[in-house]
Structure formats: structure tokens, C-alpha cells
Image (cartoon, rainbow, N blue to C red):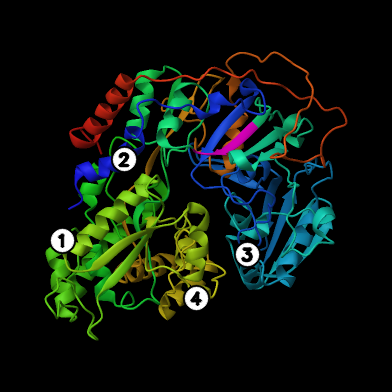
Amino acid sequence: MLSLFLIASFLLTPLLSTSTIPVSAQTEAYPVPRDQAVILETDTSFTNFDSANHLIPLGDQWGSGWHQVVEEWDWYINYATGEIIYWRITGWDYNEDYTTFTIHIREGVTWNDGHPYTADDYVFTTNMLLENTQLLGSSYVVEWVESVEAVDDYTVVYNLNKPNPRFHQSFRMWGQNIGRQRPEHIWEDEDPMEFKNWPPVETGPYKLHSVYPDLLMFIWERREDYWAKDLGYFPAPKYVIGRYAPPADIMLADFVAGMVDAPLPHLFGWDTILAAMAQTENITIAPFLDPCPLGIAAFNFDRYPLNVLEMRWAIAYCLNREKLGYLYPMADGADVSPYPWALPQYGWVNQYAPMVERAMEAIENELGFKYEYNPDKAKEILDSIDFIDRNGDGWRETPNGTVLTFELMSRPQTVIQEYYIAADLAEELRNIGIDASVRTIDPGLMGENGQLGTYDIYVGSLCGEWTMGDLVGTLDLYHSKWYAPIGTRAVGGGIHGFNLRYRNARLDEITDQLWAIGPDAPGAAELYEEAIHIITRDMLGAPAVEKMFVQTFSTSYWTGWPSEDYMYHVPYIWWPEFIFVLFQIKPVKEPAPTVTTVTETATVTETTATTVATTVTETVATMDMTTVAGAGVVALIVGVVVGWLVGSRKS
């Protein structure tokens, strides 16, 4: 069993490495005034500094700030309040049989170069995806869209190949690439497989200011001509900085010193939050349930013997959900995931609870399997299918005599909420004779491995299509149409980008039927129930814990953040609707205006494509380095150890 001390050591290693906590941001001033900037962190190591083309593999940089504050979607759902926000559009209509979809564009929306956002951009984007089938998202458009036409500058009509009462979901935050319009006047003469869209031309409230590759930092500057300003939406921060998170000790010290506003909760866990609270009053926390449970997210069905049903159930029996919930590092405990499916414990999922309960009862009757932690049952299953230790070396072999070996893919140890599950599961599997190991991958490369199928088991986030409030989107992720052999890029499907290479003809039929009817249509409930039975019986994934993140904000420079007491919007800094938080926050005190000389260095990539004629720049006074004495570090370490070893975890 993975010891508590071993798990604690994942977090403590950086803190034990020095008796003094360095503060990186204070030794060298930010390139823009600190009191005019919101500073966000990410766990993805930046490798792409000059491209924002989401239609090609590795064509953009996750976590840079581009998809949070520069790009926009047509409409949003505030999952904290349930509010539907019509943003770049004012609504939509269907014809009677859902084969024609009309979308109404809001007048006055503009790209960040001043060009109007019109129906021509919709027609251009859709036709580009129809004509270039190698682009990401093209397969969805080819499947659903027969043609598109602009009725006038602000009305677009989509003629669909078949009924789809959910087509409007394509244009919502984290919808489909058909909903991420490209400006025709920028892209029309470019090869979309090569075009970088740099600096990015988008409709959001920020545009590119500069890039500092050596500092792993992107800086975005507020658009003074932002189209939603006339509607009362305008962010107070003049700049947004996206930076790669430093090591744990520096991350904590920077937060305490007020040099970062919003650390990524994937890295800034519960014990770090407690340590920060002990050192500063300038802190607000906003706990919010993430829609992606954590656990075994995907089995690769093209990797024998993971295509064997009993093998997948045996592995699931080794997932100690209760222990993992108790040790959950990102909040004060976590709820255990009750069912083997890629759905969160959100309110809309409750409608399927009686169905999944009946499915689990039927599975126990049919197969004798229950969703529980039981290593002895796992060994019994493996023995029954002849995966046994044939030579007495302690490792089980397949029926053909090769050692039973699996590699669990996970994010790095710094992303502890995923890694600790992979590490614990690997040890549990080794305890029953399976040679299991963990391979960590930078978050920026996870999608590549998932699409190409270069993995055995992915342990991480079970992100189904939760945004629709309907099960059909998640079912579609398992559709055979997304199948691709290992080494061939899958163009869609899969959980969190990890294509399972799973094929089930009956599930395909059910999913196709559900797409054509509404969720409350006659016969829909029976189809949902049968589908739930299939995906739980086939053990496509095994969540362990519900992912509760505690987004932490500094109030050193900005106030009005979402909080536990006032959750006016989803607080997550990596979500595309973070702009609605930026619209609400205010400076603690108004910054003093300054005008100084521009100074650039060779490591800076600047853009002037959309810069106004008068350039105003600022100089930041360098702050003194702050150090923390060894006693402070000892206190912090003791606090973390106590949090891990004897802390009371509330579910």
C-alpha cells in the first residue's frame, strides 16, 4: 500500500530542498506594472510562443491566457448560478424537424483589429472545415452540416444532414470548432494547416502585448475599444499575465508576497492553502466542484489484454476509492465517486441515478461484479481467465507466457491530484502480481498521446461531455466513428482527449437515435437506460473521487473575486468564461498613471499589428527579495505533514 509518508513526500520534496524560500518574481520586476495586472499560473510548460491555431495539432498554447481572455464563444452557461449568457449572439431557432438551425448574431461585436464580426465569418469558418477534412473538428461539421448561408450580416442558416435538436450546443463555451469562428478577412488567403494566427485576431477583451519565452510568460493587454464596453462589460485590469508555475516553494512565497493573483489549484493544494492562510490575510478561497472526476479515465482497447472485459474489472477492483478520497490533496477531503462512468455529481446527472442503480444491480447478477475495492476479487478474476504466475517470480503472465505489464499514464508529480491516484493504483496492481508502472507526461502533450493511442491506461480526469446537461454527448465520445488504429490520429471522441479505441455497434445505434430526438422525447428514457447499462458493464472508466478544487485568489491588488460566500461565477482561471470574473474585480487602490520610455530586450516577442498610434508604457520599481527563515519552513513542513498524516478529512 502506498504509505501516507510517501504521498506526503511528493509535496514536501521542494520544501525540504532549501532553508530559504526564494521569490522569483520579486528579484526581477514584471514587464508591466504589478498593480495593473492580473497574474495567472498554469501547469503546462510553454513550448509554443507564436501560434494560436486550434485547428491543427499542437497549434496553440494551453494556459497562456489566449483561450481564457482573448478568444470568446457565442454563448455561455454560468455553472455557478445556472444563468445562460447570450454573448456574441442573441439567440437561435430551429425548424420543426430540427434540420435547419438559424443563429442570430449580436450587432456591434468586433474583432480586435476593428473589423465587424458578421455572418460572413460563420460561413467562411464552416466551409473551411467542410473543405479541409484534415482540420481538427472537421469530422463533426462533415457529419452534421449540409450547407450554410448568410441571410444578412447578422443571420446565419445551417442546413443539417439529419435532425439535431442540440446543434446550438456547438457554439457554447467548450462546444465544437464550428463554434469558434475565424475572421474571414484574416484567414481567407491562408493555408489553415500552416497559418499561425499570430498575433491572434479574436473578439475578446484582451490582445497580445508581448511574449517572454525565457520567463515562460505571456502578457495580454486590454482592448480599449472592446465591443462589450458599451454593454457595461469592461475589465479593470489593464494586463493579464499567464505564466508557468514555479516550484512549490516559490509559488507559495510569491502568493504570500502578492506577486501572483491566482495560482492554479491543480498545484496549489489544500495544505499549501493552509500554509498561505497562516502567512497572509490577503487571501480568498472559492471551492467549486469540477465536472471531471478523477480516476481511471481510459483503457486502450487496442492494447491486449485491456480489451478483455474481466481484465478491466479486475483493475477497477484495485482502485481504493475510500482511501483516495481520504487522502485527496486539493481540498479538505473529497466525495467518493459512486459509479463507473465519466459524469460529475452535478444536479442534472441525478435524473440518471435510478437507471445506473438498476444497471449496477444487473451487472452484479450477470457477471458477479460490483464497483468496489476488493483486491482478492481482482486476483480471483485474473486466475479465472488464466492470467497467473507461471514461473513463481511473483508476476502474472498472459496465457502465452509474457509478463502482464501495464503502464499508467498520468500528469507529473506536481499535478498531485492525478499522480497520487496513478501511484497508488500502480502499487495495488503490483500487489496482485501485475507489473504496473507510472509514466508522467507534461499536460501539453497529453492530447497527443490520447489521440494517437500511445498509452495503456490513462489515470486522470474523466471529462465526459458534461456541458450539455444531457448524457448523449458523453455516449458519443465512445462511438465507433472515432475509432483509429494505434499510431493513427483519432479526429474525435475519447475521455479528456484519450480515445479508447472502443467499438460497440449497439451503443452506436442508441447514440445515433438519441442525437435525433430531444432528451424528453418518447422512447428516450429507455435508450438512455440501455446505454448506461452498456458503458458501466463494459467498464470504460473507473472514477475514484469527485474533483473538488479550491481556487485561491490574492487580495493584495484586486478585490471582488468569487468566494465561498459569494460564488457569482465559476472561479476557475483556466475556463474560457474567466472573463466574467475579470469584469467584476476591482483594484484595491487605483494605480497612479505613469508614462515612461519603452525598453525592450532580445528575449521579448512584441506585436504592433493592433497597437494604437500612441504607445504608453510603464516601468515597475524592483522590489526587495523577501526571505523566510528556516523556522518558517519547518513550521510549514510540520503543517503539511500533520495535514497528511493526522489531519481530519471531511467528505
**Residue 440 horizontal/vertical position (percent):** 40, 56
Per the picture, the main secondary structure of the magenta-coloured stretch is strand
**Picture quarter containing residue 265?**
top left
User: Within 10 Å of the Cα at label 3, are there few (<14), some (14-19), or many (20+) other Cα atoms?
Assistant: many
Mark 3 to mark 1 CA distance (whole Å): 41 Å
Distance between mark 1 and mark 4 Cα atoms: 32 Å
- The secondary element bearing badge 4 is classed as loop
Q: Is residue 362 visible?
A: no
Badge 4 local density, few (<14 within 10 Å), some, or many (20+)? many
* Chain-order first, disc 1 or disc 4: 1
Q: Residue furthest bottom?
A: 400
Q: Circle 2 sits on which residue?
A: 329
* Residue at screen point 27% across, 65% down: 436
- The question of residue 110 being in magenta is answered with no
Q: Is residue 457 above or below residue 333?
A: below
SS of the residue under disc 1: loop
Q: Nearer the viewer, residue 304 or 180?
A: 304
What is the three-letter code of the residue carrying label 2? Answer: Pro
Distance Cα–Cα, label 2 vs label 3 = 35 Å
Residue bearing mark 1:
374
Which range is magenta?
A: 240-245
- Residue on which disc 3 sits: 137
The residue shown at (30%, 62%) is 437
Q: Which residue is under mark 4?
A: 483
Q: Closer to the camera, 151 or 400?
A: 400
Amino acid at the residue labelled 4: Tyr
Residue nearest the viewer, comparing 32 with 26: 26
Q: Are marks 2 and 3 in contact (CB under 8 Å)?
A: no
In primary-sequence order, the first of circles 4 and 3 is: 3
